[in-house]
Amino acid sequence: MYVKEEILEKISASGISGVKKADLKKIFGKDCESMLEELKADEKIFIEKKGVAYFVWTKENYVQHVTQNDPKFKLMLNMLAGVNQSIAKVKAHADVLQEELERSSLRDDAHKNDDFEGVFNSSLNESSTSIGWIPFNKIREKVCENQNLSKEKFYQMTTSLIENHQDRYEVSSGGQEGIVMRGLVHGYVRKI
């Protein structure tokens, strides 16, 4: 194992010029060939024929060697760098669009909540009785039809509206359906 490390150090020290395979065999003897094959199989070195001799590089040094000496490789490497930059720009643009979409969605939700409150209030005013108490199910029918909401979404938004504006609305327990507050179903509502 020690010899393999020495061979790898010698190859690495040769830099981007590489080292002749024959010179390695002279230094490290007959076992050098099998060690080189192991290093090549582990993808630690690269062997290439230049003229009549075989040269050996580490992967990093070989990439630098072909970048400097092979115009086609240099061109492809530059093209790849350009593609990577384009991908980075597209990703950055996609991130900006995603953020804008999220902000837009939040604005739409806020607008929908404002619309909900307006439709809720107008339904409450239209359905109001002499004593002012209106069953939630009557308001739900009007609001859900107008806003295209599910029953669950209506009660979720209604609960939020009433909790955030307790000074505007009063609820009373009872009824077939309503919002749950303090563990009780409150099926009636009126404006204060």
Image (tube, rainbow, N blue to C red):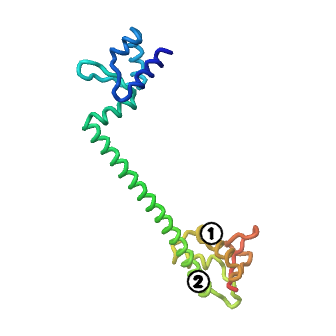
Question: How far across and how far down the image is residue 161, in percent?
Answer: 64, 75
Q: Quadrant of the C terminus?
A: bottom right
Residue located 39% across and 17% down the image: 36
- Rendering quarter of residue 128: bottom right
Q: Nearer the viewer, residue 1 or 137?
A: 1
- In the picture of the structure, the residue carrying the numbered disc 2 is 123
SS category of the residue bearing label 2 = helix
Examine the rendered structure and indicate whether residue 22 appears above or below residue 116.
Answer: above
Labelled pair 2, 1 in contact (Cβ < 8 Å): no
62 left or right, relative to 174: left
Question: How far across and how far down the image is residue 148, in percent?
Answer: 51, 72
- Any part of residue 19 in sight: yes
What is the C-alpha distance between the residues marked 2 and 1?
17 Å
Question: Mark 2 is on which residue type?
Answer: Ser
Outermost residue toward the bottom? 130
Residue located 41% across and 59% down the image: 93
2 or 1: mark nearer the eye: 1
Q: Nearer the viewer, residue 167 or 51?
A: 51
Q: Residues within 10 Å of mark 2 (few under 14, many from 20)?
A: some
- Rendering quarter of residue 78: top left
